[in-house]
Amino acid sequence: MPSSPSYMTREDLSTFLLKPITARPSIAVIDVRDDDHAGGHIFSSTHVPSSTLDHKIPELVRTLNGKDIVIFHCALSQQRGPTAARRYAQERARLLSSTTQVKAATGPETSAVKAEETGHGTKVEGTEQKIYILDGGFVKWQEK
């Protein structure tokens, strides 16, 4: 079972985002607000409404595979943001586990093909990825 996502402060996120792209880890900020998204957003964030998470989580795991850090937030990061971060972490762990099991059963040379043939995976690499929740959400972010 994956560990629970940690919280990241707005100051830490701001520090990351203000660094030149070549001098910072690869970051994705995922905004899971629904209709309340209309009030603005964090620059370079991706809007994935919480109402779409059931079918978007596997796609997010696949598309964010190369990111070093993934940060989820909603308005206050009390409900939707933490739930999305946990679900993402669980799905990522599940897909990594499936890929590992397929590799063990088939050998590393054929694992990617076999994973897709058996429906176990979207290709997910086992690189370390840190998953965070933005402390205080967008409301606290805007106060800065």
Image (cartoon, grey):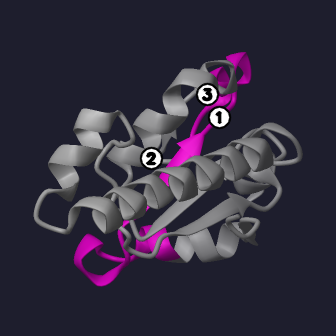
Of the pair 45 and 88, the residue shown nearer to us: 88
| Left or right of 30 in this view: 114 | left
* Span highlighted in magenta in the image: 16-41
Eye-nearest disc, 2 or 1: 2
Who comes first in sequence, dot 3 or dot 2? Answer: 3
Q: Are marks 1 and 3 in contact (CB under 8 Å)?
A: yes
Query: Which of the 4 image quarters holds residue 74?
Result: top right
Q: Is residue 80 above or below residue 53?
A: below
Residue 34: x and y in percent read 69, 21
Q: Is residue 44 visible?
A: no
**Residue that appears at 89% across and 47% down:** 78
**Residue that appears at 68% across and 45% down:** 87
Q: Which residue in the protein does label 1 denote?
A: 32
Who comes first in sequence, dot 2 or dot 1? Answer: 1
- Helix or strand or loop: what does disc 1 sit on? loop
Q: Is residue 30 above or below residue 27?
A: above
- Helix or strand or loop: what does disc 2 sit on? helix
Q: Quadrant of the C terminus?
A: bottom right
Residue 96: x and y in percent read 45, 59
- Separation (CA) of disc 1 from disc 3: 8 Å
At label 3, the amino acid type is: Leu
Count the marks: 3
